[in-house]
Image: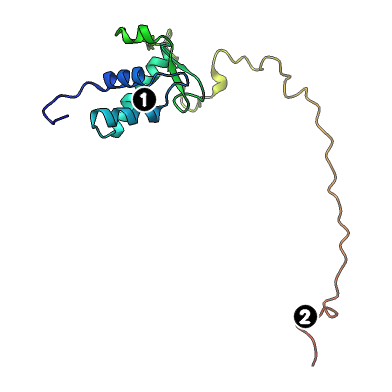
Amino acid sequence: MSNREKLPATKQMTRAALINLHGKNGTTLVAVKKYISETYNVNITTARKNMIRNYLHTLIESKELLIKTGRGLTGHFLLRDLKKFTSGDQPAKTKRFVVKITRPLRKKAPREHGQTSSIFDTPAFSGTLAGSTPIDVVPKAPARKAKRINRQTVNHDETPRSSTQEI
């Protein structure tokens, strides 16, 4: 390709690679990247590699691409329906969840000077945890006596490296 010709989008290049590499054993991420770099004479940059990976993940989530071996994009994967994929249908978009942050239902009472906040100040905590016994009821384990080790006293005069040896 000459420099003046415009390259197709990475998504279209990836679709073409999956169609042409479709076989009994499927294809791998490395084979898809190699096909794109050889066919379109493009360097696979980090950004392009990430676009390829993201597009393959969307195909896996939409169940158009089956994982044959491995986990994620590490193994072999193949197209579920080649005819449907070549017709140009885009994969169904996955649902996104929206988290809505609301204001508190009631205002907290202002604390008096000297009070500290604690996790036990919440209304859910009523003094004892469900399924537990109060601290006062739990019997104390008997204290263990420390083991006494028989140590022998050493006469330093008889040791071979004694510093007080006479010559």
Label 2: how many Cα within 10 Å (few below 14, some 14–19, many 20+): few
Q: Which amino acid type is shown beneath numbered disc 1? A: Arg
Q: State the quadrant of the C terminus.
A: bottom right
Q: From the viewer's perspective, is 121 left or right of 109?
A: right
- Residue matched to label 2: 161
Label 1 neighbour load within 10 Å: few <14, some 14-19, many 20+: some
Q: Is residue 43 above or below residue 27?
A: below
Give percent across and percent down for residue 120.
57, 21
**In terms of depth relative to the viewer, which is nearer, 83 or 91?**
83
The number of callouts visible is 2
Disc 2 residue type (three-letter) = Arg
Q: Nearer the viewer, residue 125 or 70?
A: 70
> Image quadrant of residue 125?
top right
The CA distance from mark 1 to mark 2 is 72 Å
Q: Secondary structure at mark 2?
A: loop
* Residue marked by disc 1: 53
Assign a secondary structure to mark 1: helix
Residue 107, placed above or below residue 120: above
Coordinates of residue 111 in the picture (x, y in percent): 46, 21
